[in-house]
Image (cartoon, rainbow, N blue to C red):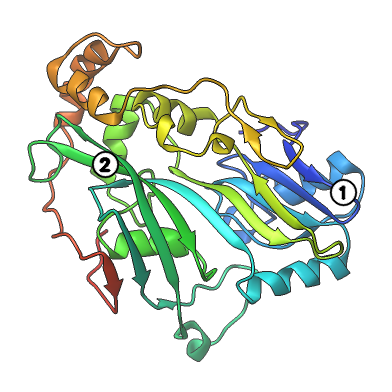
Amino acid sequence: MPGDRAMLPILFRDEHLVAIDKPAGLLVHRTALDAHERRFALQMLRDQLGCHVYAIHRLDRGTSGVLLFALSSEVARAVSSLFEQRRVGKSYLAVVRGHPPLQGEIDHPLRRCFGDDETGGEAATATVQQAITHYRRLATIELPYAVDRYPQSRYALLELAPLSGRRHQLRRHLKHIAHPIIGDTTHGKAVHNRLFRTLLGCQRLLLACTELRLQHPVSGAPLVLTAPLGGEFLRLVERLQWAATLPPAWLPGTAATTDGGRVADEQPGADAAAASRCLAGGHASPGGWAGECAAADSDVAAATATPAVPGRSARHAGSGEADG
């Protein structure tokens, strides 16, 4: 969590726009939901740049990654219009429970959630809005720990592409298909969150906005904004040997080329299956898996078992039972 004088990482800046890499745990702006919080991305960036900035979109407090601001109200309105017209491409990474299909579409309307800065009567809060999310499975792993009713625990790394922008859409959609995001204390599963804290030392919501793609509102040039993984999320991806499945620009240690692409440093070559074999067999590994697994056994075993929800098909539509 950044301190009061911490500098926010700037991914892009010109005279019209500025994009930062928002850390997990940082609110975008002041909210009555946490009246005691004194650090907000909006205020921190304003103080850092010495000028007014305008929020264009939002990321949940627990979500890290690309967060775009405008430097004038006119540009803010123009970019907001691009978001409303679904002319902004958005890519997220998430670690979820289970092994979803290789790819799919979640077409599931969501009841509107009002924030503390919005007002709505009884009729407004009952509004149901269209919401669509595409996903692609990048990697999977099985850990030799019994959580729920199965002898092993399955997890997957997903690339998510929300076509709409509803509040908490990705977290609610992944819950809807029974593959909740790890670290989600509202829509996720406590026993799986506890396993990741105990076994892997991962305390955060495993959701990151890694890329935004849009047309510059003034120049019209294509603009691709990327935020490489860092911190706990990066360490987890490396320890599970999933890094080789990601675009080079989504990993640290890359250098920009003249055409706006990225050049990657050396990446791990092993796959997640090797990590799974290491865990199951207790062999030595760079991350010290055997010792960590043995030390965590008693704590993980204390997790409350709950029945798993049957898997869904590759296309998910309509209403479904909650998986909370």
Residue 190 at what x, y percent from top left? 28, 45
* Tag 1: amino acid: Asp
- Residue name at image x 43 percent, y 78 percent: 111
Residue 322 at what x, y percent from top left? 25, 66
Real-space Cα distance between discs 1 and 2? 40 Å
Checking the image for residue 183, the label placed there is none
- Residue under circle 1? 14
Can residue 36 be seen here? The reply is: no
Can residue 115 be seen here? The reply is: yes
| Most foreground residue, 311 or 121 | 311
Residue 232 at what x, y percent from top left? 47, 29
In the displayed structure, 101 sits above or below 165; it is: above
- Residue name at image x 14 percent, y 22 percent: 280
Q: Quadrant of the C terminus?
A: bottom left
In the displayed structure, 58 sits above or below 258; it is: below
- Residue name at image x 21 percent, y 27 percent: 276
Residue that sits furthest to the bottom in the current view: 123
Residue that sits furthest to the front in the current view: 259
Count neighbours of disc 1 (C-alpha within 10 A) and say few if under 14, some if 14 to 19, many if 20 or more: few
- Residue under circle 2? 155
Count neighbours of disc 2 (C-alpha within 10 A) and say few if under 14, some if 14 to 19, many if 20 or more: many
- Residue name at image x 40 percent, y 78 percent: 109
Say what secondary structure mark 1 lies in: loop
Q: Nearer the viewer, mark 1 or mark 2?
A: 1
In the displayed structure, 73 sits above or below 318; it is: above
Q: Quadrant of the N terminus?
A: top right
Q: Earlier in the sequence, mark 1 or mark 2?
A: 1
In the shown orientation, is residue 170 left or right of residue 282? right
Residue 314 at what x, y percent from top left? 26, 64
* Tag 2: amino acid: Tyr
| Most foreground residue, 283 or 171 | 283
